[in-house]
């Protein structure tokens, strides 16, 4: 319980007034001995205990009435996250509102989003403190504190509206702390409204420890109240483009995309999708398996050199994550580079050659000693069949991968201690009797995923006679029956590094047939083109300051848009910019209550879990105390009522007995 008029509570000693008055009244009557009273004492001795109980009850009712009056005047608040005993109205209330895309999830049984529900609860709570506390709003997009004059205006403010952004809760708390320091605030409460999405709370972030220490070091008291909007929502799916390349197939221009579709519930069915290409919308379908599916799709574009597109899912539990945008262009065609010095050079060149609208572009071929002179500015994939790089060559390749390029290593048959990003080659192994067989591989994503038509690559038919062990920690995309890796992947920055444990030589394997090697290399070639797309691709909330200075127009609506909060395809002069919501907003995982409480360990913290509590954030209960006061007064009046004889005395008392004394 907390109180709006907590100063009234200083009058609590007034509940002793009935006791003081009772004692004063007793002092007014001094006892006198009188012989005749002895008979009265004897006659009423049996009722003395009842009389004392009655007097104590009368005194208790009077004390209770005064107490209820004081509590009534102090305007107590109870319910939900406002239930701290004697919390009082703080000097400052900071409202930290999560406006991330996940907060637009609808609450089952209502038409409200989590954000709308949170704002409604906050407004109802903050209105009680408008005249007592300084209210400050801090949203997850701008992270700029702003004063709030009236709580009712909060839902209409631009900084509380929906957005396609992610949230950074530690950064929001840091901004709140800085404001408290800069403004030398007194006692403060921080109200946080969030859906506890893990990627927004970042519970493993090192900033949490420093934040809690900073708040604990403040001289004034700071209390944290968290409104967790984790109510049940209808089934939701999100969509995002993970890979994109403009290619030429059979003299037909194509855009090949890999789309990630994630769902909150396991389901295998057909997902309807609206596909928009340069403003023209058509209906297509995607086969979805389980909760996470990587769906590959081809779009014919003829001889178009560039354009933009949009994919939109059907309405579900959250409309904010149903759309993804992309742009295709042949401004930077795919190009492969092969580093080798043996007879496999022609095979590598054929597999890593790219086909674009201008024809076939053969992969460059260099010896390891010539790599230092190579130009990687237009390269999307490097195939490395030589001893692992060291020194300057390794540094150049790391930078290439960080920018989004792809690098695949094939074994040279020699075991050594050289490592590249923690991975290396172990001993060579030769199958003694039966060849090595691949038992499992990732069919949904990566270079070994199913074809656009849903067909498996024939990895289960691949015969491997020799292999070289991959050393180090990496994601295994394909493994032999004994668990050893056939293809391993390590992510660095925006790019990826792959280790394939066998060679396309008959003495090693059947990989040279091309049924597995060519699709794998071509997909890596296309995926590496993302290093060029970074110049015109960004995420909401992360658009560079330089780009924000330009005037951008949405190609979809023709209107100016807010690149920091609204996803879309924008154009400024000849420049294009594709802005999507951050990828981490497609993650549905939430932080557990116990972990959240542990993050605020050492501070006064209260968690209101909206999923399990349906009460309002707070409500005034002064009327309850008024009723209790009236009841106490009525009981006291009943106890002190005078007793009347209902029958008239019909006899006159006779004289006292002769032996009586007066």
Image: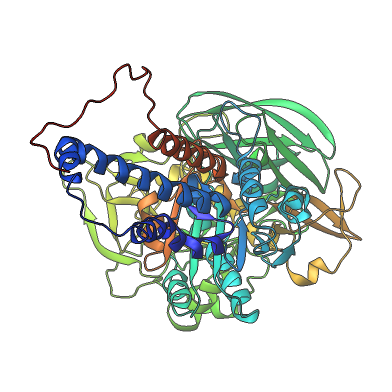
The answer to which of 177 and 364 lies nearer the viewer is 177
**Residue 484, how many percent across, how many down?**
26, 51
The percent coordinates of residue 499 (x first, y second) are 40, 58
Vertical placement of residue 353 versus 441, above or below: below
| In this picture, residue 649 sits left or right of residue 497 | left
Quick check: 114 left or right of 589? right
Q: Residue at x 17, y 48 (%)?
A: 35
- Residue 112 position (above or below residue 126): above
356 or 72, nearer to the observer: 72
Left or right: where 648 falls relative to 529: left
Q: Residue 302 appears at what percent x and percent y?
A: 81, 38
Q: Position of residue 432 (x, y in %)?
A: 16, 47
* Point 39% across, 50% down: residue: 593
Could you say which is closer to the camera, residue 227 or residue 555? 227
Does residue 344 appear in the picture of this structure? yes
Residue 241 visible within the image:
no
User: Residue 343, located in which quarter of the rendered image?
Assistant: bottom left
Task: Tell me which corner region of the image, top left, top right, bottom left or bottom right, holds residue 457.
Answer: top left
Quarter containing the C terminus: top left
Asked if 32 appears above or below 291 in the picture, the reply is: below
Q: Is residue 464 above or below residue 494?
A: above
Left or right of 502, for residue 385: right
Q: How many marks?
A: 0
Instruction: State the residue lying farthest toward the bottom.
Output: 391
> Which residue is at the far left?
659
Tell me which colouring the rendered structure shows: rainbow
């Amino acid at each position: 319980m907390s109180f709006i008029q907590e100063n009234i509570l200083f009058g609590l000693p007034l509940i002793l007034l009935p006791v003081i008055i009772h004692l004063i009244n007793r002092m007014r009557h001094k006892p006198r001995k009188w012989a005749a009273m002895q008979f009265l004492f004897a006659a009423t001795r049996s009722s003395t205990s009842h009389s004392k109980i009655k007097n104590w009850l009368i005194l208790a009712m009077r004390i209770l009435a005064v107490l209820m009056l004081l509590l009534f005047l102090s305007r107590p608040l109870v319910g939900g996250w406002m239930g701290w005993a004697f919390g009082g109205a703080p000097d400052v209330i900071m409202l930290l509102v999560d406006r991330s895309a996940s907060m637009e999830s609808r609450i089952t049984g209502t038409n409200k989003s989590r954000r709308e529900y949170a704002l409604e609860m906050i407004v109802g709570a903050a209105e009680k403190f408008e005249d007592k506390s300084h209210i400050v709003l801090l949203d997850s997009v701008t992270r700029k504190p702003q004063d709030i004059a009236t709580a009712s205006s909060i839902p209409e403010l631009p900084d509380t509206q929906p957005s396609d952004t992610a949230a950074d809760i530690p950064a929001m708390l840091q901004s709140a702390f800085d404001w408290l320091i800069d403004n030398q605030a007194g006692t403060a409460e921080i109200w946080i409204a969030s859906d506890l999405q893990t990627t927004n709370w970042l519970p493993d972030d090192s900033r949490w420890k420093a934040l809690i220490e900073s708040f604990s070091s403040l001289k004034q008291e700071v209390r944290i109240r968290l409104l967790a909007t984790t109510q049940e929502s209808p089934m939701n799916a999100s969509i995002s483009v993970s890979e994109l390349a403009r290619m030429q197939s059979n003299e037909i221009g194509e855009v090949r995309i890999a789309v990630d579709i994630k769902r909150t519930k396991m389901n295998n069915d057909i997902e309807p999708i609206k596909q928009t290409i340069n403003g023209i919308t058509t209906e297509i379908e995607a086969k979805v398996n389980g909760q996470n599916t990587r769906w590959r799709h081809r779009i014919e574009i003829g001889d178009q050199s560039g354009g933009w597109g949009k994919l939109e899912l059907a309405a579900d539990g959250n409309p904010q994550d149903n759309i993804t945008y992309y742009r295709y262009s042949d401004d930077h065609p795919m190009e492969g580079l092969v580093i080798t010095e043996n007879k496999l050079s022609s095979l590598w060149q054929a597999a890593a050659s790219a086909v674009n609208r201008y024809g076939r572009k053969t992969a460059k071929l260099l010896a390891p000693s010539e790599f230092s002179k190579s130009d990687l500015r237009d390269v999307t994939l490097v195939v490395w069949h030589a001893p692992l790089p060291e020194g300057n060559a390794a540094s150049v390749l790391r930078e290439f991968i960080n920018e989004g390029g792809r690098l695949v290593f094939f074994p040279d048959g020699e075991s050594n201690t050289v490592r590249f990003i923690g991975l290396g080659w172990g001993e060579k192994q030769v199958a003694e009797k039966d060849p090595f067989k691949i038992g499992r591989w990732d069919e949904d994503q990566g270079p070994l995923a199913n074809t656009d038509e849903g067909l498996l690559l024939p990895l289960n038919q691949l015969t491997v006679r020799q292999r070289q062990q991959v050393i180090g920690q990496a994601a295994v995309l394909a493994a032999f029956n004994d668990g050893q890796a056939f293809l391993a992947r390590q992510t660095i920055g925006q790019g990826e590094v792959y280790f394939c444990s066998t060679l396309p030589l008959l003495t090693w394997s059947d990989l040279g047939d091309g049924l597995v090697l060519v699709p794998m290399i071509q997909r890596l070639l296309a995926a590496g083109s993302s290093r060029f797309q970074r110049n015109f691709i960004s995420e909401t909330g992360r658009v560079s300051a330089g780009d924000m200075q330009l005037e951008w127009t949405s190609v979809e609506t023709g209107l100016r848009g807010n690149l920091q909060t609204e996803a879309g395809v924008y154009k400024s002069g000849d420049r294009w910019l594709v802005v999507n919501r951050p990828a981490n907003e497609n993650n549905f995982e939430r932080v557990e209550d116990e972990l959240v409480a542990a993050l605020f360990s050492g501070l006064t913290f209260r968690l209101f879990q909206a999923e399990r509590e349906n009460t309002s954030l707070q409500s005034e209960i002064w009327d309850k105390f008024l009723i209790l006061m009236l009841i106490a007064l009525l009981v006291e009046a009943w106890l002190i009522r005078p007793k009347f004889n209902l029958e008239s005395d019909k006899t006159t008392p006779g004289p006292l007995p002769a032996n009586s004394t007066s």
